[in-house]
Amino acid sequence: MAKIYIKTFGCQMNERDSERVLALASSCGYTEAASLDEADLIVINTCTVRRKPEQKVYSLLGRLGGLKERRPHLRIAVVGCLAQQEGDGLLERFPQVDLVLGPDRIGELPRALEALEGGERLCLVGFHQDPCQGVLLPLRPSVRAYVNIMQGCDNFCTYCIVPYVRGPEKSRPSGEIIEEVRLLAERGVKEVTLLGQNVNSYGKKSPGELTFPQLLSKIDQIEGIERIRFTTSHPKDLSEELIRAFVDLEKLCEHLHLPFQAGSNRVLERMGRAYTREEYLRKVERLRQLVPRVAITADVMVGFSGEGEEDFRQTLELVREVEFDALFSFKYTPRKGTVASRWPDDVSSEEKQRRLEELQELQRAITLRKNRSLEGQVMEVLVEGTGGRPGQLRGRTRCNRVVNFPGGEELVGRLLWVRITEGLQNSLRGELCPLEVQEAVNA
């Protein structure tokens, strides 16, 4: 039986796309390979949001050229955002590549595999107008699962490649999404994360469709699902209705990922973010007013075109004011085809690195202090699997903090109450509460 090996670069949406690729390949008779060496088909699922993942793909493709020389029957496919961006250019540059498949064309994989068997080399890119993906479940659902609710983006931030490689914004039918979540619950999934480039705008281009808060409410009613998360949110579309959903919906976890990208209004305007620093801070204040224990994480970049020292200082001030629970920070790198790629990349590499290190040092101190403040608290933890040590379990709080604690594998998939004993830089340590505490809290 033919075997497939998938290497994934990038975000949660790419992870879900890889699950779709595996499920589609399975329907064509493929089983999953444990390594590159035993694969008949290698699929590289790519990301172009930042330069580093793109460089890793090219490096891997170079190494695979030698592997294919030794094993001529091997087929190599490049899927995802880099495939959409480069198209036929990948076939021309890398003779070892047999298939190039854009993210909007993943559903055509069975047809493409049939063409590969006939010796063809194929490039399928471009965008469909139909947002329907069908209900295609992961082959091995675990405690947590990702569910795509939309594809593409209409925001066109000046630095961002996503609208060009993922296409225009399209929302999946809510009925299809709800059915997928229901089936996942039947298979033992306890937590779902709804995915989209801008989940807040779900349904806005689909007359008669549910709003995003309404969709959350429907999923909140599905039996078996214990927790709901979503990512990513755009600040300009964070409505009062959505903020109130954190209060009204029992299963919606108290965690919001809300990228702010820069703390300077001048830089935000150049980025095309469509909100100001003050508007962002007001929404954070309103969210914390209604949900005091909410955890807020964000994305931010340093060294954007034209960013001066004062602009960077304003970013640091915003981080100090908000006190994010975690921050994903990056150095700006121009992306081919974006508006900003035509502007001077006028902050030196050394200066970008200095700013990034200062920002990260600030955030590390905030995160560690917040994690330590949780010591002694009893928190609900969904057990996701075993930890890095024998006899250790790994779980996650509702506010998205990882907790490691002693326990047996029979507890995987359970919601348990854990007393936090130590707050570390990137995780928490804890101990299971006694049975009487578990029962009392659940009563």
Image: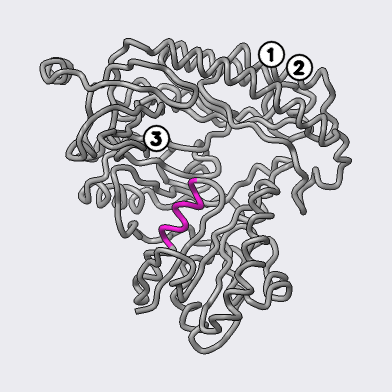
Q: Position of residue 296 (x, y in %)?
A: 50, 23
Q: Mark 3 points at which residue?
A: 229
- Kindly report the secondary structure that dominates the magenta region of the rendered protein: helix
Element type at mark 1: helix
Residue 111 lies, with reference to residue 276, above or below; the image says below
Mark 2 or 3, nearer chain start: 3
The quadrant of the image that shows the C terminus is top left
Tell me the residue at 52%/37% (across/down): 232
Alpha-carbon span between mark 2 and mark 1: 6 Å
Tell me the residue at 46%/11% (across/down): 289
Residue type indicated by callout 3: Arg
Alpha-carbon span between mark 2 and mark 3: 32 Å
Is residue 256 found inside the magenta-colored segment of the image?
Answer: no
Asked if the residue at tag 1 contacts the one at tag 2, i.e. Cβ–Cβ closer than 8 Å, the answer is yes
Q: Where is residue 337 in the image (x, y as percent from the top left)?
A: 77, 53
Could you tell me how many numbered marks the image carries?
Answer: 3
Q: Mark 2 points at which residue?
A: 313
Alpha-carbon span between mark 3 and mark 1: 28 Å
Element type at mark 2: helix
Magenta stretch in the rendered image:
12-20
| Disc 3: CA contacts within 10 A as few (<14), some (14-19) or many (>=20) | many
Element type at mark 3: strand
The quadrant of the image that shows the N terminus is bottom left
Q: Mark 1 points at which residue?
A: 317
